Amino acid sequence: MKLDRSGYPEITLPPLKLRIGTESFALARPFRIARGSKMSADVLTVMIDDGQHQAMGEAVPYARYDESLSKALAQLRPLIEPLAEGRLRWPDLGMRLPPGAARNALDCALWDYWAKYSGQSVADLLGLPTLCDQITAFTISLDHPDIMAQQAAQAAQTLPLLKLKLGDPPLDAERITRCRAAAPKARLIIDANEGWGFDDLVPMAVVAQNCGIELIEQPLPAHLDVALGDYDGPVPLCADESCHGDDPAQMRLLSRFFQAVNLKLDKLGGLSPALPMIDAARDAGLDLFIGSMVASSLALCPALLLASHARWVDLDGPLLLAQDRSGGLIIENGVIKGALCRLWGHA
C-alpha cells in the first residue's frame, strides 16, 4: 500500500456511512495522576459502513490538550456528508482534523475498514511484523505510599513491569522506596505527569537510581523542558506530554532534553502518522515507548501494532477496566497475547 509522506494511504475513499458516538467504561478502581482522578474511561467511538463491511475505531479526548468528547464529535460531524458521497481522500484527514482523538478514532476505523475491504490484516497492509506477545506495564495510580505499596506487592505477584504514578513531591520518594520494597523483583518505571520542578527531579533521580528505576517519564511541565538541558542524572527521561501532534521535526528538539519518547495515537492523530513519527524518533536517537490513554481494547489494538518497535509498552487499559469490550485483548501475567487479537484490524 502506497503511503504519502505523512503516513496516510494515497486512496480516495469509497462512499462510507459514518456514525459517531460515545461510550463509558467503569474502572476497576479510581485512576489518579498528578492532574486529577477519574472513575470511568469515557471514549469516542467511530463506526463506518459501506453496506457490506463494518469497522470501528476508538479514542480518548484528553483535557490536557483542551479536548473533550463534545469537541471531538463536533470535529467529526462535518465529515459525515463528504464521506457518504465519496468525496474524501484518506490524506484529507491530516488537513481536515487536528492531531487528536477525533482524527485518531476515524483513522483507526478506516484502517479496520480497509483490512476488511481488502481481505488483508492491517499488519500485512503496512508490512509490519505479525502481532506477537508483548509485555505491558501495569499502572499503580497515585495514592498514599501505604496504598501504592500494597497495590505494587499484589500486582508484582503476576506482573513483571509496573509503572508508578507520581507528581506529589513531598511523598514521592517514599512512594518509590516503599513500592520497590514491596515489589523487589519487578521492573519499575515512574511517571510524574508534569508534577515536579527541576529541584524535585535532581534528588528524585538519585532515589530512582537507588531503587533500580528504569525510566522517569515527563518529570516537568512541558513548557519547562528547556530546564532539562541541565539534567545529567543517572536515570533516563521520557517525554510524554511534551510530545504532541504529528510533526516529525519535534523529535530532534525532544532529543535535546529526553532519552525516550512516549508515542500515543490519541496525541499523534492516528495510526497513519505514527510510522513517520517512529522513524523520526529513531533517527533522533530516542528510545520508543508505546502508550495509550485509559480505554478499551478497541483503542489499544492499533497501538499494539507498533509495540515491536518499542523498548517499553504501556497498553494496560483492559486491566484497569471493570469490564473490557467483548472480544478484547487477552493479557496473561502482564503479557499481551497479540496473536489472539481479533477485535480490530483483521479481514
Image (cartoon, rainbow, N blue to C red):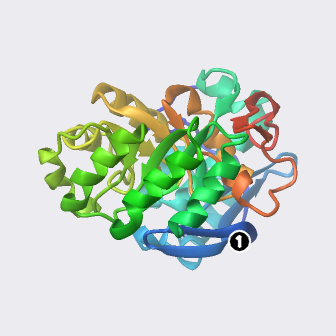
Q: Position of residue 64 (x, y in %)?
A: 42, 69
Residue assigned mark 1: 22
| 242 on left or right of 187 | left
Left or right, residue 114 beside residue 92? right
Query: Where 153 falls versus 311 (above or below)?
Result: below
For the N terminus, the quadrant is top right
**Crowd tier of the residue under label 1, counting other residues whose Cα lies within 10 Å: few below 14, some 14–19, many 20 or above:** some
Going by the numbered disc 1, the residue's amino acid type is: Thr
Disc count in the image? 1
User: What x and y, as percent, mark residue 219?
Assistant: 32, 56
User: Residue 134 appears in which quarter of the rendering?
Assistant: top right
The image quadrant where one finds the C terminus is: top right
Q: Is residue 195 left or right of residue 136?
A: left
Residue 140 position within the rendered picture, expressed as x and y whole percent measured from the top left: 58, 57
Query: Residue furthest toward the bottom?
Result: 70
Q: Residue at x 75, y 68 (%)?
A: 25
Along the line of sight, the residue nearer the viewer: 238 or 74: 238
Rendered residue at 81%/47% (across/down): 328
Q: Say which residue appears at 44% left-offset and 50% top-offset.
A: 190
Q: Is residue 179 left or right of residue 80?
A: left
Please name whichever residue, 61 or 146, is drawn nearer the observer in this view of the structure. 146
Viewer-closest of 10 and 101: 101
Q: Residue lying at the far left in this picture: please name it.
A: 230
Query: Does residue 109 appear in this view?
Result: no
Residue 182 in sight from this viewpoint: yes
From the viewer's perspective, is residue 73 above or below residue 249? below
The image shows residue 109 at horizontal and vertical percentages of 68, 50
Compared with residue 323, is residue 292 higher up or lower down, i.e. above or below?
Answer: above
Q: Secondary structure at mark 1?
A: strand
